[in-house]
Image: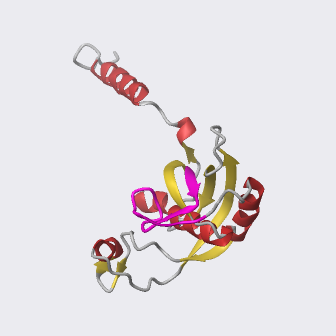
Amino acid sequence: MVDSFTSMTKVYEGTMRLGEETDSYDSDGIIVETRPWRHITVDQVRLSCRDFLGPIQQTPPMHSAIKVKGKRLYELARKGEKVERPARSVFVSEFEISPRSDGGGQDLNFSIVCSKGTYVRSLVHDLGQTLGCGAHMTALRRTGIGEFSVDDAWSVEKLAECMSNSRAEKSGDGRRRRET
């Protein structure tokens, strides 16, 4: 079933920061460049997101598990090496932006619906390049895969309760009774 799940469409929610680029395209990396961002409006970001809809070619980040010439890219990146990475075809069906409630403007929330193999942090990085201010991802959560949504997921407590009830039903008084 794993192959079935990995090939399903993915849904993500996250946060990006405008004006800062990192070497890993996310907040775990080192900031390598800062640029002015205050002149960028949410509407401009939303408009630029349209450039990333549909089938696109995406270059994976250096900090990824993809192998090039037998070496994982993140291993090379940790050594300070940078290599050519072949672009990959991915599909983005939705890329939505919303301002954060704190109103700061530098950090924006996003939601993305995309195909298997899409690097969301690369999308954020590429969007920052398109805007001319740079950007990196500061938070990411997968909220859906195929027809499955985190909104429909059970809590750990609910799962434990159901398993406990199931065990109790199976064991009854310790033995199964025969219908006579």
Name the chief secondary structure element in magenta.
Answer: strand
Residue 19 belongs to the span the image colors magenta: yes
Give the residue displayed 37% in from the left and 21% down from the top: 165
Direction from residue 47 to residue 163 in the image, left or right = left
Q: Position of residue 88 (x, y in %)?
A: 53, 78
x, y percentage for residue 110? 62, 52
Q: Nearer the viewer, residue 152 or 59?
A: 59
Residues shaded magenta = 10-35
Q: Is residue 11 visible?
A: no
Q: Is residue 66 magenta?
A: no
Residue at 34% over, 15% down = 180
Determine the residue positioned at 38% across, 74% down: 66
Q: Is residue 143 above or below residue 63?
A: above
Choose top left, top right, bottom left or bottom right for residue 91.
bottom right
Q: Position of residue 135 (x, y in %)?
A: 56, 62
- In the image, residue 166 sits, relative to residue 23, either above or below, namely above
Nearer to us in this view, 52 or 17: 17
Residue 163 in sight here: yes
- Figure check: 83 above or below 127: below
Of the 4 image quadrants, the one containing the N terminus is bottom left
